[in-house]
Image (tube, rainbow, N blue to C red):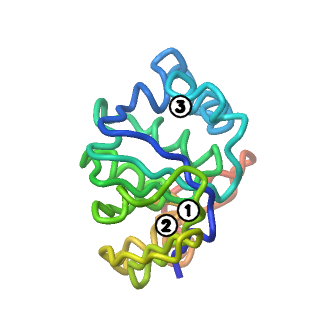
Amino acid sequence: MTEAEGGRVWRLGDNVDTDAIIPARYLNTTDPGELARHCLEDLDPDFARAVRPGDVIVAGANFGCGSSREHAPLAIKAAGVSLVAAASFARIFFRNAVNIGLPVVEAPDAVPFIRAGDRIVFDGDTGILTDLTTGRTWPTRPFPAFVREIIAAGGLVELTRRRLEAAGRLRRDRRDGEGEVGRP
């Protein structure tokens, strides 16, 4: 099951772009921990210090607009956010989020009713989004099986690594622990 369990909601507005998610001055690193320390700092200077594992971002329309870099969803995931629910997403942000294993769901009917601090649960298998604070539920589109598989693996790269290992096509004989694709 792909699920966000009772995370505390952080509310954001419409058109939150990738520069607001992770300012360009931090794009010289791909270290997830470093990106997490600066996640949303220009929009909410307290976010990176106050966010807790399992928390959820609920945003308005066009979340993640701007550039196509993966730094933005990576910063959110590394900060501990378990789900981003928005009225709508920039298409490339949505795909980048799935590719790195960050659950994202379009929930335009729910967004206006969910408040900062509420606790919500999302079941990716059924598509049901539940506000535990108010008891309201909203149907959304369930994750397709392949998306659930990517998210469960922690991202597309890790899923691919696992599949290659299972097929005997990834050697782990390098000292740095990274695998090489090739003949066994």
Q: Position of residue 132 (x, y in %)?
A: 58, 73
Q: Position of residue 32 (x, y in %)?
A: 62, 39
Q: Position of residue 106 (x, y in %)?
A: 32, 61
- Residue at image mark 2: 151
Residue found at the very far top of the displayed protein: 25
CB within 8 Å, label 2 to label 1: yes
Depth check, mark 3 against mark 2: the one in front is 3
Q: What distance separates the C-alpha of mark 2 from that of mark 1?
A: 5 Å
- Residue at image mark 1: 154
- In terms of secondary structure, where does tag 1 sit? loop
Nearer to me, 31 or 80? 80
The quarter of the picture where residue 75 lies is: top right
At a point 72% along the width and 34% down the height, the residue shown is 49
Q: On screen, 16 above or below 1?
A: above
At a point 60% along the width and 32% down the height, the residue shown is 35
- Residue at image mark 3: 40
Nearer to me, 116 or 160? 116
Which numbered disc, 3 or 1, marks the residue that appears first in the sequence? 3
